[in-house]
Image: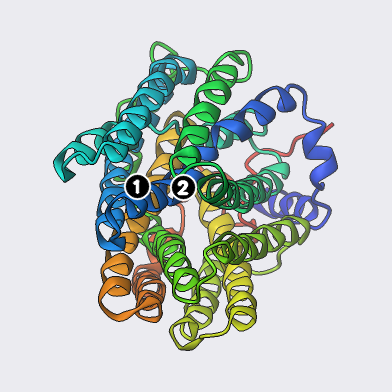
């Protein structure tokens, strides 16, 4: 019997459906389109804060600290938001969340423009970060609920990574263009508006949200934390390194553009970096991988560490753009593999929370990175800030190598996981329309 199951899983992997078949999933477009608009906070919030606070204070260090407070607040509250969404439903969490977020960002803008003290900026930054809607994890949880046991799950993980990175292509460029061409606060104002409209539209799509675990009668303990799974803890630590790349690149590219007297180059350079991530994500979703996800994760982080190792030594816009593209190409495989592993490691009743732990880890790493890179850029120039992505990814790689055994799911409860060479455990063969 195990041989038969393994053969089915291998066959499903080799003939894995593509993006076209994924997007024909009934009801998918109903949550994908509003979800795209509501994801913009993660792409626009940090850079919007950095640009506004630097404009009002003249310090990248101060701007980085305010952005870091927002990121830390998001990292601490995001998993709790995910846990509540698993228990009570996504709409019940989203509706009050987007309202609080829009109001908090509005307060942050008002305080910054009025020259309020740093503590006032912190007072607005905390609820702004805590209320960032976790739409990306919620969309991933909707895919997981719809595609349970399907070979399309790996394709869905790649598609979500591409969508995330597409927002990182659009978000920073849009925020930078609005801040430079309209008003220093325009980037944050647009972020709040997109969050409010997109979040409310996404919350209205109740038919596609996973069934709340409260009162569902499932055998799994609905109140147990996804962080109790060892593999989730390892992935969360590793994703801190991804956040270090995002945060370090945002601040350092902004400082570099200021140093060369061309602030508008920041949006272009970061857009190229994010475009590399998006292109790699598209490619990852189209490949039927023969190697296991754990090996792919370590290889991905090794490549990312090597790619970030030369950033600090570059002083040319074209060379920095090319190297940023390479760094972006190395991020997507690591992100996709990590998110795909969650489907194998965590029961369905805790998936939204598990996804938010990873998203929160990225935010926490980003917060630490913008603080460190901002201080280094103020003291030693933009080149010093580029050391932050290298240090973050190197530490993440060391953690993965040391704790790689914890990324293998337990045999019990995850049928056929051992027989699958891809990032998805095909527990039951299904027919995919």
Q: Quadrant of residue 427?
A: top right
Residue 133 is drawn in which quadrant?
top left
Determine the CA span between mark 1 and mark 2: 7 Å
State the residue position of label 1.
229
| Residue at x 37% of width, y 60% of height | 240
Which residue is more in the foreground, 19 or 430? 19
Q: Name the foreground residue: 406 vs 384.
A: 384
Query: With respect to residue 215, does 75 lie above or below?
Result: below
The residue drawn where x is 38% and y is 61% is 406
Residue 292 in sight from this viewpoint: no
Res 61 visible: yes
Percent from the top left, x then y, of residue 280? 68, 63
Image location (x, y in percent) of residue 89 = 46, 17
What SS does tag 2 mark? helix
Closer to the camera, 14 or 306?
Answer: 306
Query: Residue 123 location in percent, x, y?
Result: 20, 34
Q: For the residue labelled by badge 1, is the local secondary structure a helix, a strand or a loop?
A: loop
Q: Is residue 13 above or below residue 347?
A: below
Contact? badges 1 and 2 (CB < 8 Å): yes
Pinpoint residue 363: horizontal percent, then vertical percent.
38, 50
């Amino acid at each position: 019997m195990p041989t038969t199951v393994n053969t089915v899983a291998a066959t499903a992997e080799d003939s894995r459906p593509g993006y076209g078949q994924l997007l024909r999933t009934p009801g998918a477009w109903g949550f994908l389109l509003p979800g795209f608009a509501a994801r913009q906070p993660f792409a626009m919030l940090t850079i919007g804060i950095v640009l506004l606070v630097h404009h009002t204070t003249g310090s990248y260090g101060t701007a980085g600290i305010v952005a870091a407070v927002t990121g830390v607040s998001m990292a601490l509250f995001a998993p709790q938001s995910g846990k509540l969404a698993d228990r009570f439903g996504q709409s019940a969490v989203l509706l009050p969340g987007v309202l609080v977020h829009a109001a908090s960002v509005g307060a942050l803008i008002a305080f910054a423009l009025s020259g309020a003290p740093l503590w006032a900026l912190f007072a607005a930054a905390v609820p702004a970060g805590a209320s960032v809607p976790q739409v990306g994890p919620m969309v991933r949880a909707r895919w997981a609920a719809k595609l349970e046991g399907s070979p399309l799950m790996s394709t869905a993980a790649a598609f979500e990574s591409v969508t995330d990175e597409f927002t990182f292509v659009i978000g920073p460029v849009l925020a930078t263009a609005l801040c430079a061409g309209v008003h220093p606060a325009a980037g944050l104002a647009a972020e709040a508006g997109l969050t409010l409209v997109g979040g409310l539209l996404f919350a209205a799509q109740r038919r596609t949200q996973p069934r709340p675990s409260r009162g569902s009668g499932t055998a799994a303990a609905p109140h147990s934390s996804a962080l109790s799974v060892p593999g989730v803890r390892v992935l969360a630590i590793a994703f801190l390194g991804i956040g270090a790349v995002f945060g370090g690149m945002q601040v350092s590219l902004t400082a570099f553009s200021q140093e060369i007297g061309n602030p508008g180059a920041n949006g272009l350079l970061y857009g190229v970096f994010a475009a590399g991530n998006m292109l790699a994500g598209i490619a990852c979703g189209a490949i039927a991988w023969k190697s296991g996800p754990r090996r792919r994760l370590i290889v991905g982080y090794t490549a990312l560490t090597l790619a970030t190792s030369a950033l600090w030594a570059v002083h040319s816009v074209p060379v920095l753009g090319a190297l940023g593209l390479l760094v972006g190409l190395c991020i997507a495989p690591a992100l996709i593999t990590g998110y795909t592993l969650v489907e194998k490691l965590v029961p369905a009743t805790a998936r939204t929370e598990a996804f938010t732990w990873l998203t929160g880890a990225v935010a926490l790493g980003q917060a630490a990175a913008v603080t460190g890179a901002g201080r280094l850029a103020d003291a030693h120039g933009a080149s010093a800030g580029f050391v932050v992505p290298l240090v973050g990814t190197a530490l993440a790689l060391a953690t993965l190598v040391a704790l790689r055994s914890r990324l293998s799911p337990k045999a019990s409860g995850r049928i056929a996981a051992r027989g699958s060479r891809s990032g998805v455990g095909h527990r039951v063969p299904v027919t995919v329309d």
